[in-house]
Image (cartoon, grey):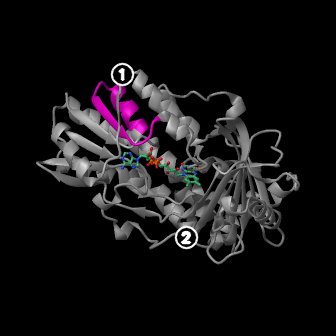
């Protein structure tokens, strides 16, 4: 039976490791942090897991957060326009907003408890090459920052040369949560987007915000401040941003208490969305595959990165298990075929996300306006956030959008 090395125990690496383990393959997982170190770390993201991702984690036997009290089934949208546009959609299947400091350590412990081999190590490119000597295939899933030199950028699939948004994400205090868990999407043209959700953290469900600031717009300054330098000033700037650009959130703010929950509970920064080659030769006829953010990095604006990482892990696991069962080699033809399949599956999410980092086209605004008049359209639009192939098929051309609107007339 072939042996597989996986470097990086994020969403991609863990879903792949658990899947291959279930298929009976020998898997070694190399991760630079222990579960407790991940728990004690800084907020890495504000991830919403979609219904398809939740179905995959059920199939892997790691759906530990199935309670209705953790599920978000309301999507509220608001666009600052004259007059403002807004609607509330009710997707039939619910999302899970969960802190990766809760999620990843638990899955890493599941993998180890099922007999999986976990090696605490921070690998560089030479370390990845060394793994090829003892494994039939090396999968590198180290996120958007780690080991990226191994896998060159694919320019024709990467339309943006740099970050299109500056980011702030944080768990906050002084914000009353809505009665039912809601995902709020507040669009402030020219400035960016403010998302609010209620997030399952190590301390229970708490309100969280994600600001996607357009460079040069009024939301950018908060993404360049450091809370640690002057917490009161930071909290005041965050409050100003919410009051000016997030009216759905502003109405529940307690101005005296509002702010970042703790210095560990926020992040600022930016990501460059891009697609890299999905495989690289390691010498001796062995190859490394790139998976997750390392292969395709999405800006968080459409909430696709982690969901696509688990889809990619699922597809890769099926192909790897099939190849192993056939006794076939993990050669270049295998890697090239897998790269094609991954691109076919992930392309809608990538193109949709990249397109909507630009100012929304008129047909997208027409869809939002129509959804504010039609409940069935609002529900369908909200549902399709979790199905990027459907969403992009509708939004990728004015004609397709017009047909979609007409089908809900
Ligand atoms: C603010 C924000 C909000 C987001 N919201 C969403 C959302 O709503 N929905 C969504 O689907 N996605 C969202 N994302 C994107 C999502 O977080 C990523 O797409 C996802 O985490 C990628 O998973 P990954 O496994 O590829 O990488 P990572 O999660 O980055 O995991 C990489 C792992 O590799 C380890 N590692 C790194 N380098 C090495 C090394 N050299 N040796 C050994 N180990 C190493 C790291 O410790 C880490 O555990 C968001 C991101 C941000 C920043």
Q: Which region shows up in magenta?
A: 14-34
Residue furthest top as drawn: 114
User: In front: mark 1 or mark 2?
Assistant: 1
The picture places residue 376, in percent across and down from the top left corner, at 72, 49
Are there few (<14), some (14-19), or many (20+) residues within 10 Å of tag 2?
Answer: some
Give residue 91's quadrant in the image. top right
Badge 1 marks a residue whose secondary structure is loop
What residue is drawn where x is 63% and y is 49%?
Answer: 264
Q: Residues within 10 Å of mark 1 (few under 14, many from 20)?
A: few
Left or right: residue 96 versus residue 138 is right
| Residue with the mark numbered 1 | 115
Dot 1 or dot 2, earlier in sequence: 1
Q: CA distance from mark 1 to mark 2?
A: 43 Å
Q: Position of residue 260 (x, y in %)?
A: 73, 53
* Dot label at residue 154: none
Residue that numbered label 2 is attached to = 164
Pick out the residue farthest to the front.
229
Task: Classify residue 391 by image quadrant.
Answer: bottom right
Q: Position of residue 277 (x, y in %)?
A: 31, 59
Q: Nearer the viewer, residue 113 or 71?
A: 113
Q: Is residue 41 in view from this perspective?
A: yes
Asked if the magenta segment contains residue 25, the reply would be yes
Could you tell me if the residues under marks 1 and 2 are in contact, i.e. CB atoms within 8 Å?
no
Q: Is residue 276 left or right of residue 393?
A: left
Q: Nearer the viewer, residue 277 or 337?
A: 277
- Residue 50 picture location, percent across and down: 57, 42
Question: Which residue is at the far left?
Answer: 284
């Amino acid at each position: 039976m072939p042996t597989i090395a996986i470097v990086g125990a994020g969403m991609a690496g863990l879903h792949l490791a658990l899947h291959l383990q279930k298929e009976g393959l020998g898997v070694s997982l190399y991760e630079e942090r222990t579960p407790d170190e991940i728990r004690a770390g800084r907020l890495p993201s504000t991830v919403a897991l979609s219904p398809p991702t939740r179905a995959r984690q059920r199939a892997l036997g790691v759906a530990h957060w199935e309670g209705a009290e953790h599920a978000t089934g309301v999507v509220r949208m608001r666009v600052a326009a004259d007059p403002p546009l807004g609607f509330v959609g009710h997707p039939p299947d619910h999302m899970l907003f969960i802190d990766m400091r809760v999620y990843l350590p638990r899955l890493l412990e599941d993998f180890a408890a099922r007999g999986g081999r976990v090696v605490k190590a921070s690998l560089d490119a030479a370390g990845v090459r060394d793994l090829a000597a003892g494994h039939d295939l090396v999968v590198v899933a180290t996120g958007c920052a780690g080991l990226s030199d191994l896998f060159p950028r694919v320019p024709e699939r990467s339309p943006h040369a740099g970050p299109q948004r500056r980011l702030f994400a944080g768990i906050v205090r002084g914000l009353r949560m809505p009665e039912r868990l809601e995902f709020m999407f507040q669009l402030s043209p020219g400035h960016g987007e403010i998302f609010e959700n209620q997030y399952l953290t190590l301390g229970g469900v708490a309100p969280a915000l994600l600001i996607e600031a357009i460079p040069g717009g009024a939301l950018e300054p908060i993404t360049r401040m450091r809370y640690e330098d002057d917490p009161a000033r930071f909290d005041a700037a965050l409050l100003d941003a919410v009051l000016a650009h997030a009216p759905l959130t502003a109405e529940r703010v307690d101005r005296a208490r509002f702010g970042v929950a703790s210095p560990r509970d926020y992040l600022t920064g930016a990501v460059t969305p891009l697609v890299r080659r999905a495989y690289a030769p390691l010498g001796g006829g062995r190859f490394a595959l790139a998976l997750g953010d390392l292969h395709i990095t999405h800006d968080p604006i459409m909430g696709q990165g982690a969901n696509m990482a688990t889809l990619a892990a699922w597809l890769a696991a099926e192909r790897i298990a099939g190849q192993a069962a056939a006794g076939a080699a993990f050669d270049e033809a295998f890697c090239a075929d897998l790269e094609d399949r991954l691109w076919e599956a992930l392309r809608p999410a990538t193109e949709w996300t990249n397109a909507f980092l630009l100012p929304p086209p008129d047909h997208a605004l027409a869809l939002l306006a129509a959804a504010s008049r039609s409940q069935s359209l609002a529900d369908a639009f909200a549902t399709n956030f979790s199905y990027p192939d459907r969403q992009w098929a509708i939004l990728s051309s004015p004609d397709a959008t017009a047909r979609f609107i007409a089908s809900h007339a």
